[in-house]
Image (cartoon, helix red, strand yellow):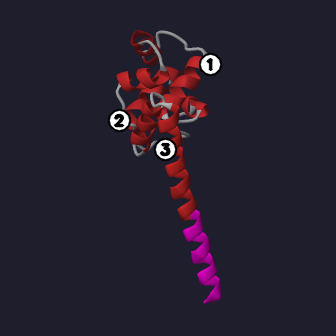
Amino acid sequence: MNIGDNIKRIRIAKNLSQKEVTVNAKLDTAQYSRIEGGKTDPSVNTLERIAKALGVSLSDLFASTEELKEINSFDKSIMEKVALMESLTPEEKQTIYTMLDAFIGKRKLKDALSSVLHDIK
């Protein structure tokens, strides 16, 4: 199986269109189609961008069918939102980072308190 077949299999498993991948990877649609079709060999830089757009590691693109870990479409909406965040102003990005920090801090505090309460019992 060639790299194009692996990329296509991962894209389909993640329920992504070629257009979504090309936009997120900042690739020409025709070039991406040739890569998936096995008509051209992409550079390492291009493979890194495709892997990032698909939400997988670079090594996942080379994994055989047996080695390829289950690829979940759960990450699709997260990847789309992360890509859209690039268009936000620095102030809007900072607001999102502040909110994320607050949620993560709350989760850590909750876990720590739960652990302390468990130890007291």
Residue 24, visible in the rendered structure: yes
* Mark 2 Cα-neighbour bin, 10 Å: few <14, some 14–19, many ≥20: some
Of the numbered discs in the image, which one, if any, rests on residue 44? 1
Residue 40 is one of the magenta-drawn residues: no
The answer to which image quadrant residue 108 occupies is bottom right
Are discs 2 and 3 less than 8 Å apart at CB?
no
**Side of 26 relative to 46 (left or right):** left
Residue depicted at x 40% and y 10%: 30
Q: Amino acid at mark 1?
A: Val
Q: Which residues are magenta?
A: 108-121
As helix, strand or loop, the secondary structure at mark 3 comes to helix
Q: CA distance from mark 1 to mark 2?
A: 24 Å
* Mark 3 Cα-neighbour bin, 10 Å: few <14, some 14–19, many ≥20: some
Residue at the disc numbered 3: 96
Of the numbered discs in the image, which one, if any, rests on residue 15? 2
Q: Nearer the viewer, residue 71 or 16?
A: 16
Residue depicted at x 60% and y 82%: 118
* Mark 1 Cα-neighbour bin, 10 Å: few <14, some 14–19, many ≥20: few
Q: How far across and down, in percent of the image, does residue 45 sit?
A: 61, 18
